[in-house]
Image (tube, helix red, strand yellow):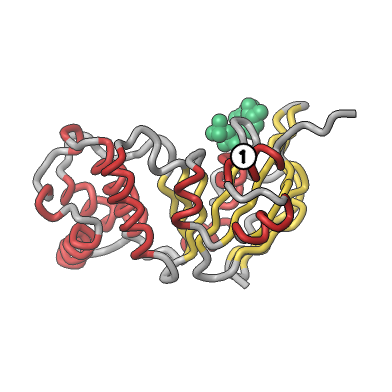
Amino acid sequence: MNISINELTKTFKDRVAVDHLSLSIEQGEFFALLGENGAGKTTTIKLLSCLMEPTSGDAIMLGDSIVNNPQVVKKKLNISPQETAIARNLSVKENLEFIARIYGSNKKEAEQKAKRLMDKFGLTDRAKSKGRTLSGGLERRLSIAMAMISEPEIIFLDEPTVGLDVRARLDLWQILLDLKGQITIILTTHYLEEVEALADRIGIMHKGRLRALGTLDELREQTGQVKLQNIFLQLTAEVKS
Ligand SMILES: Nc1ncnc2c1ncn2[C@@H]1O[C@H](COP(=O)(O)OP(=O)(O)OP(=O)(O)O)[C@@H](O)[C@H]1O
């Protein structure tokens, strides 16, 4: 088992952002975490990627605890955050090489890694373009390529296609489909068609808690709904007393 989350909880003062979350994610799985604004998705990603400490509970990531061994866990994963962190005055190639050097590659290795990732992410013909000149779609592709430099076993993608036009979104989906199975991918998104196109399994959060978990077919069966939009609305509806 790849990721085992056990009663993970994060509170900010009296606000519970993640509330006793428990679930497991298998190696190589493409897992989509859904939920309304404020449901706790980004906080969950920050906890699992050791950017934030849980208030209680734990998660075992490839055998190591985020509470006891965060430094070890960090080496196994990477994140492409909502706000991409590309250097605007460096070129595509320089951004990738810079990150590779940070992770300890020598100059030659960094060049090789940058080349390989530019090929994989369709960035080769923009190698010399400065970060600030990239379209939203290319910026996002570069951000994910940068996260792949460290050869993580788990990658977190926090709303990777926000603001992208239809073609840029479809191009990114294709890249993600090509990655599928090679690495564990945890995606948060508000685009349900993205989830239908990409995800093996879906977790739906509501107010910090896990409301539902399963494949699309399992969620269909559970709710009696066909469209993911209707499944989502049903599962995140407030229970009226
Ligand atoms: N640093 C913080 N300090 C205080 N409250 C926070 C902090 N970060 C998140 N929260 C609160 O925790 C809850 C969960 O937020 P989170 O960003 O994890 O939700 P989300 O599901 O990612 O939402 P969105 O879809 O809008 O990105 C929200 O009520 C939010 O206001």
Disc tally is: 1
Which residue is disc 1 drawn over?
A: 35
Of 140 and 66, the residue lying toward us: 140
Q: Residue at x 28, y 51 (%)?
A: 171
Q: Residue at x 34, y 39 (%)?
A: 85
Of 96 and 34, the residue lying toward us: 34
Rendered-image quadrant of the N terminus: bottom right
Would residue 121 be found to the left or right of residue 21 on screen? Answer: left
Would residue 239 be found to the left or right of residue 43 on screen? Answer: right
Report x, y in % for residue 45: 56, 47
Residue at the far right in the pictured view: 241
Would residue 162 be found to the left or right of residue 107 on screen? Answer: right
Rendered-image quadrant of the C terminus: top right
Vertical relation: 157 (above or below) 240: below
Q: Residue at x 31, y 52 (%)?
A: 146
Local crowd at mark 1 within 10 Å, few (<14), some, or many (≥20)? Answer: many
Q: Residue at x 11, y 42 (%)?
A: 129
The amino acid at mark 1 is Gly
Report x, y in % for residue 101: 26, 57
Would residue 117 be found to the left or right of residue 11 on screen? Answer: left
Disc 1, SS: strand
Vertical relation: 119 (above or below) 27: above
Of 146 and 55, the residue lying toward us: 146
* Pointer 1 residue Cβ closer than 8 Å to ligand 1: yes
Quadrant of residue 55 within the rendered picture: top right
Vertical relation: 189 (above or below) 30: above
Quadrant of residue 24 within the rendered picture: bottom right
Ligand 1 shows up in the quarter that is: top right
Report x, y in % for residue 84: 35, 38
Report x, y in % for residue 43: 60, 40
